[in-house]
Amino acid sequence: MTPDQILFIVTALISTLAAVMVVSRRNMVHAALFLVLTLFGVAVAFVLLEAPFLAVVQVLVYIGAIAILMIFAVMLTRNVTDDSGDPFNKNARVGGLAALFVFSLLVVMFGGWSQFTAYPQAGDTSGSIVQLGVALTAADGYVIAFEVASMLLLGALVGAIFVVWPRQNENE
Amino acid sequence: MVTNLLTDYWPILVLLLVSLGFAGIAMGGGLLLGPRRSSARKQEAYESGMRAIGPGTRQMPVRFYLVAVLFILFDIEVIFFLPWAVVFRQYYENGLGAFILLEMLVFIVILLVGYAYAWKKGALEWE
């Protein structure tokens, strides 16, 4: 085994175990903290795939912001530190079967894709930030998507304020 | 490949090892060397040396959530700046400086609408 493979296996094991902990903890704050570990594992996976920009985004946005948002969301609910009860309900078996079905479907689909086992070659710049910048800004690239992204952010911003802001008629 | 990784990500690995080592030595050293005389006062949650008021993880006002959402949105906005900034000079030297500047202006102006809305609504203030 190459050092790369060892690094990948260790990372994959840690993030998978952390992901299992996320869905099985009785304390939601602990689940949120395990989610951070899972997201960090994904960041390492991006590094191994030679996608450094995505790794940085993963750490900055997902670990830095989304995880904090998750913890806030958990703390908005009642009795956070209390035992939230058994995380499995009577649909757990059906849900598990459905997840297994989707997973095997994905394995079959990706298994048939020739690029699935391809590894980035040395000197391959397709994952570099310059390439991403060109793709996002070129007139024949994804410039429309780039501008639409700001509309999406605008929608989320206005939506968040609208949802959180106290209604005037409720104050009366 | 892994040699590449080691040279590129060496500082991150060092940072990780130093932080883990520091925390491990500090906690392990305290565990090994420090005397342990427990008292009810010491068992309380640490709150800057003061007596803690209420539980540490009580229900939070929803305003905190709004702050977190606003933080994420502007965080993502900044993330979009980076690939743009990296290729800016390339465009400028090809005589397309106005084009790429306009692209970012459109992007920012759309978001400025949201910023103005948040400001007008008072969402950036904490009464």
Image (cartoon, coloured by chain):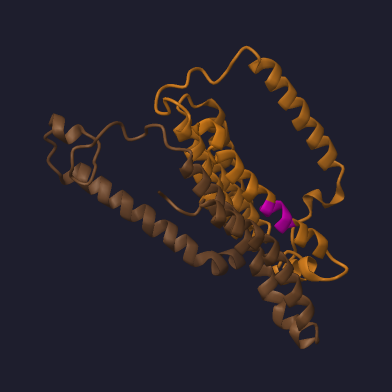
Which residue ends up furthest to the front in the rendered image? A172
Most common SS among magenta residues: helix
Up/down of A123 relative to A34, above or below: below
Name the spot of residue A59 as percent of width and height, x first.
Answer: 55, 54
Residue at horizontal 14 percent and vertical 37 percent from the top: B36
Q: Which residues are magenta?
A: A149-154
Please indicate whether residue A161 sits to the left or right of residue A128 in the image. Answer: left
Quarter holding residue B15: bottom left
Residue nearest the observer in this picture, A20 or B75: B75
Residue A94 included in the magenta stretch of the image:
no
Residue at horizontal 55 percent and vertical 37 percent from the top: A168
Chain orange in the figure, letter = A
Up/down of A87 relative to A139, above or below: above
Please indicate whether residue A48 sits to the left or right of residue B120 in the image. Answer: right
Quarter holding residue B100: bottom right
Residue nearest the observer in this picture, B99 or A116: B99
Residue nearest the observer in this picture, A99 or A73: A73
Chain brown in the figure, letter = B
Quarter holding residue A138: bottom right
Residue at horizontal 77 percent and vertical 71 percent from the top: A134
